[in-house]
Image (spheres, rainbow, N blue to C red):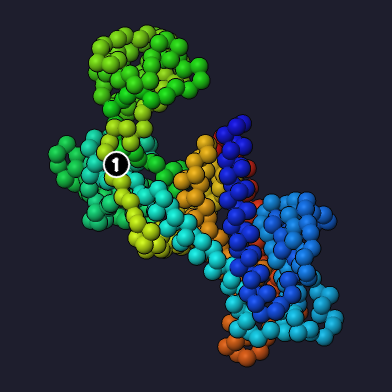
Amino acid sequence: MSEFLIKAAQLILSLSILIVLHELGHFLPAKWFKTRVEKFYLFFDPYFSLFKFKKGDTEYGIGWIPLGGYVKIAGMIDESVDKEFLNREPEAWEFRSKPAWQRLIIMIGGVSVNVILGIFIYAGIMFYYGETYLPVENAKYGIMVDSVAYNIGLRNGDQIIAVQQKKIKSFDQIFKEILLNDAETIQIIRDGKAMDVTITEESKIAIVKSRKMAFLAPRIPFTVGDFVDSSPAQLAGMRSNDQIVAINGNPITFFDEAKNILKDYKGQKISVSVLRAGKPAEISFLLPQTGLMGVSPVSFDKVLKLKEEHYSLLESFPKGLEKASNTFENYIKQFKLIFSPKIKGYESVGGFATMGQIFSPTWDWEHFWNITAFFSIVLAIMNILPIPALDGGHVMFLLYEIILGRKPSEKFMEYAQYAGMAILFSLMIFANGNDLYRWATNQF
């Protein structure tokens, strides 16, 4: 329960920061162009608000439905579909009275802020924390695969040297290169021999359906890291940092080897040989029917050599721009997977629960800001889509006006808003419905 609350708190804080700054991106240029802003709200407030106050012409507040936020600009047909102003002559301080170029700047302000914010957060991370990663060549024991990677053709101990003949800098880039860059081959070394593994479309479908970025991991010797609650191994006397070297006389070195042996001893008493501070010890206990000892290995960063890169203040901004650009590019590439009728990436689309799962179960500020920067870029992309009721829909109609010299009719704009809201609500229901289905089927 505590992990759920920590993740939920991080999600709410992250979205609150992004929503307030996004709406500020509309609010400030509206004020600069002397356009009246009637409301500035975090979250939605149908019927009542949790908190509000008025300063000047603007009411500021916090709504009770945490699904976003908004600024209500006078004289603009927006998601509130307020049409009362249409019955009177335009006022000089209304949105509809402003030149098209001013209205365009007001509408792209939110997206612009999200892009700039993403760059600045990434730059701040680079300056304060630097960058730590596992170079592919430092995964000296090769890879450890799950069933998805096994079906692709990879095996435990394979050493990945390239994807589609492209050298990979860090281990966590392998997934992106395989799936997002439409790679067809992986170059590996197996038992001292170089070979290619072909990535079929069926393999890509399996990766997407598994919803795993870590379908392969660095292979490491089996040194005990932590235990689950009521772990039979821990209750029998196993300790953290014990190095497991044999199970029932079967010698092992790696974690994956232990998994393969344990499946043959479900519900049986086993004897585990360990090295503790260099000295041998034997631990015996009844292995549950699950075939699990309730033990996790130490994290790979305690075994393999990571690379750390640090940046000065001036160096951090180009690096932040690079990371924001890569995030933007990779997210755009994901749309191809979502709309592919074969890969069916839409089945992996998630809502708020999926977003919450991305955060750490402990409060990790570096991870929090990385996810917030990612969400900021994603929010910019989603908002600029040419769907009525989104910023991109307004931009689309404003460009139409600028190019052709005439506005779409107000009645058309009204119906477009209705259509846009219907599309957005349908997408929200679909995404959160996927979350509900995965929760009901224990897929989270």
- In the rendered image, residue 77, in percent from the top left (x then y), is placed at 73, 74
Which x, y percent locates residue 76? 73, 75
Residue beneath label 1, please? 306
Image: 59 above or below 185: below
What's the residue at 75%, 51% (across, down)?
A: 64
Residue 223 falls in image quadrant? top left
190 lies left or right of 171: left
Image quarter for residue 183?
A: bottom left
| 9 vs 397: above or below | above
Residue 65 at what x, y percent from top left? 73, 52
How many neighbours does mark 1 have within 10 angstroms: few (below 14), some (14-19), or many (20 or more)? some
Relative vertical location of residue 275 with respect to residue 424 in this rendering, above or below = above
Picture coordinates of residue 424, whole percent (x, y): 65, 61
Three-letter code for the amino acid on which mark 1 is drawn: Leu
Q: Residue furthest bottom?
A: 405
- Indicate left or right for 365 with 439 as reference: left
Of residue 32 and residue 443, the one placed in the foreground of this image is 32
Residue 412 in view (yes/no): no
Q: Nearer the viewer, residue 202 or 311?
A: 311
